Image (cartoon, rainbow, N blue to C red):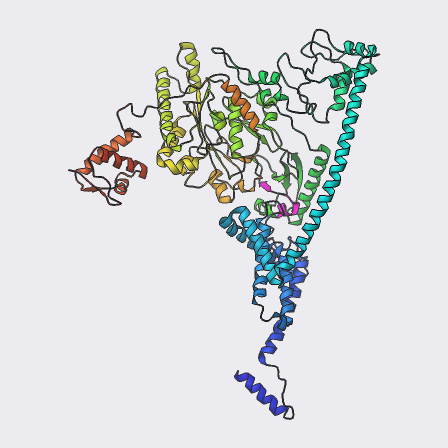
Amino acid sequence: MLSRLWLRERANKIFPNKKKAIVPTLRAYFHELTLLLFSAVMLFFSLALSSFNPADNSPVFNDTARASYTNWCGSLGASFAGVTFFSFGLGGYLVLFLGWYLLLMSILPLWFRRKPMRTIGVMALPIFFCSFLAVLPAGFMGASPGGFVGEVGKSFFGQLFGFYGALLAVGFGLLTSFVMSFDLAPSSIVRPVRFFVVKLFVAVRGIIRVASLVVGRAVMWTFKGVVWFFGLLRRRKERPDFQEVLKEATPEKSESPVSHWNEFDEMLAGAARKKKREKPLEEPGVPRDELGTVLDRGLVDEIEKVKVNHEERSYEWGPRLSVFAFRTKVFSGNPFASSKFAAFLRKPVAAGSAFVPPDPSLFAETHEVRRDIAKFEQECRKRGGQLEEKLRHFGVNGSIVSIMPGPVITLFKYRPEIDTKLSKIIALEDDLAMVLQAHSIRIVAPIPGTDVVGFEISNQHREDVFMSDLIQSDTWKQSVAELPLLLGVNAVGEPVIEDLTKMPHLLVAGSTGAGKSVCLHSFLLSLLSRKHLDELKLVLIDPKRLEFSAYADIPNLLFPVITDVRRAEPVLRWIVGEMERRYDEMADVGVRNLLEYNELADTRGLERFPYILIMVDELADLMMVTGKEVEMQLVRIAQMARAAGIHLLLATQRPSVDVLTGIIKVNFPSRISFRVSSKIDSRTILDYSGAEKLLGRGDMLFMNGNSATLQRVHGAYVSVQQIEKLADYLRGAGEPNYQVIDESSSGRSVGMDEEEDRLYAEVLELLKSMDEISISMLQRRLRIGFNRSARIIERLEQDGYIAPAQGSKPRKVIR
């Protein structure tokens, strides 16, 4: 204020004749200088963003030193552009636009005054824009399209509203900030949208009216044409020569190879025979079907015209089924719906007869092959050249020595030069994924036993892996594993089969929707389709009550499917007792494992012991409800039950350290990890990172306990129909013989074991020197969990040693 008065006084002295001297104040000078500086900064910012190159050295995109920069503004421009795109992603261009917008508003101060809501909108617009890009489904616009700001907004709104709620909230915020930034009225946006919707509705209504009229006329004329055509065929059928052709084409003492063709199809086939009646019906080299009838060449030609150009599959069926019955895409509808096929597939086993494991053809399904091999090979070679070029661009020299394509990913084996550090290649993982536009890249540096680095790059078009294809493969048929688990296929499409007896237990973890439940079903399908009813018994624990419900009442179950987790602890305790009983029997005969005992049992007439598989679908819920008791039983089984033929398969969708405790992990050397959300979860499961780079839908990393390396496996898809066919087949083979757990047979209270009886005796000794007792005090004194302490307190009250509870106060001891 004083400076302004001093300037005005000086101006009046210099210009005494003018009434009002126009003297710029200090604030006006600063305003103009700020505008000039802001304009220079915005021009610099525009040039830096326009010439951005990820290969330039910047704090976030590249940490390698470069002698030259492609950015027009040098190293500072490269760093400035890199930080901007890292922070805002594609929203960096919006930030540039808003910067110029703010500059324009500063130049026009009268328009900018009294508009605080416009300023708030301009500041909020890039935040909501980046959050909206990040909330979009994964893979929609590449990796992290909203930058760091978008990921923070996605995390905040996602935890607060969920996916769809976050998408709605961020979209509403983006629209609101846009309206506030440009001082628009909401009606100005709604009015043209309403006008467009009304016009579109009127146009669609007119199109529907015209189309209904045209379709009605077309249906009427088509019906008249069909009636005329069948009338023509009926008149032709009455001719003598046509009757002779039909009689000649039909075998006399055998039914038609395709018995479910209708009369119209047989007429077409007869017409084809008539055209070729000069040729002999039986040609050299023409095979005969299982009924003994000659496959007429005219009928084959007619079927080839109807058949879609898909891969033809052959199946081993019963003696009354034709080879034409299951050709891919020949007939419409489901071939399994036929009563003849259903009776064959079901194969009910009579009482007292031997059980026959289901044939692999039971799971046969037809799938369309979409991949163009030549085009796919060209894409792989093109990607290999791009990979070499980009690595050379980042300062890594070398060459690709081989390309191994697979159904989901393609493995590129790259041999770097001798002076290249592997850490430098691994650091380029995200940069290469962005440059190659791949969903995911996993670098194996090096591939064990070689001098090459493996780049596992996701294919642009993914091919699904089906259980029906793998279970009929030669690899599966020739497998000699005792308890074979069909995991899926490896990176190059070869089936992966592991023996559960050599694992001997398996831990499966992964986030929701990554393919964990389908993997469990594929394990059950592979085991139940190979093992006899008396060779494998199951204990299925399903806290979610949905996954294993299809296997209810199959004869392999030792107990009904356990959906109440409180019943899991006594069942596991029964398993521990069965383990100890088996060890006693094996010690009596002097053998060391289940295979030796069963071989000896066949010669001495002893009881054979089946394998027992305990499968838990959700370990986290089981641990949360039952606590340390179930963990103790699981650890005992994992430590000791291998030789007794008892194996564990645990699955969880929450791979945290409170669920996968150290004592559990150390007893499960074989583990499978599906896609997880972070490197921390990957290290929790596998002790290595990499599971966060998986693609989902059955894509997994398998760590075999006999090997320290990770194997990339793509799980096989099991349909609901295949599960139901297998379950129906097994139910037709016999009834389950459920075990009965008598928890009160020893005279103890329900839930009390020998360990708790010993603790109960110690508590009675403590009561002699106490006047009050509580659950927390027992936990501290005896070092036991809350559930066990609570049971002991309840038993003391039942036996009359302590008084009833009075709120949260300790219980009084009754003398």
Q: Is 177 within the magenta?
A: no
Q: Is residue 17 above or below residue 333?
A: below
Q: As rendered, which of 730 and 239 lies closer to the eye?
A: 239
Extreme-bottom residue of the structure:
17
Decide if residue 287 is on the left or right side of residue 557: right
Q: Is 437 within the magenta?
A: yes
Decide if residue 256 is on the left or right side of residue 568: right
Q: Name the residue located 73 percent from the left edge and 41 percent from the top edge.
A: 209
The residue range painted magenta reads 431-443
Q: Name the residue located 64 percent from the left edge and 40 percent from the top edge.
A: 414
The C terminus lies in quadrant: top left
Q: Is residue 359 above or below residue 687?
A: above
The answer, for residue 665, to whether it is visible in the render is no
Instruction: Give coordinates of residue 26: x percent, y percent.
Output: 58, 80
Instruction: Give coordinates of residue 266: x percent, y percent.
Output: 74, 16
The answer, for residue 163, to whether it is visible in the render is yes
Q: Is residue 360 above or below residue 190?
A: above
Q: Name the residue located 60 percent from the left edge and 33 percent from the top edge.
A: 491
Q: As rendered, which of 408 and 256 lies closer to the eye?
A: 256
Instruction: Give coordinates of residue 524: x percent, y percent.
Output: 51, 26
Extreme-top residue of the structure:
253
Instruction: Give coordinates of residue 272: x percent, y percent.
Output: 80, 17
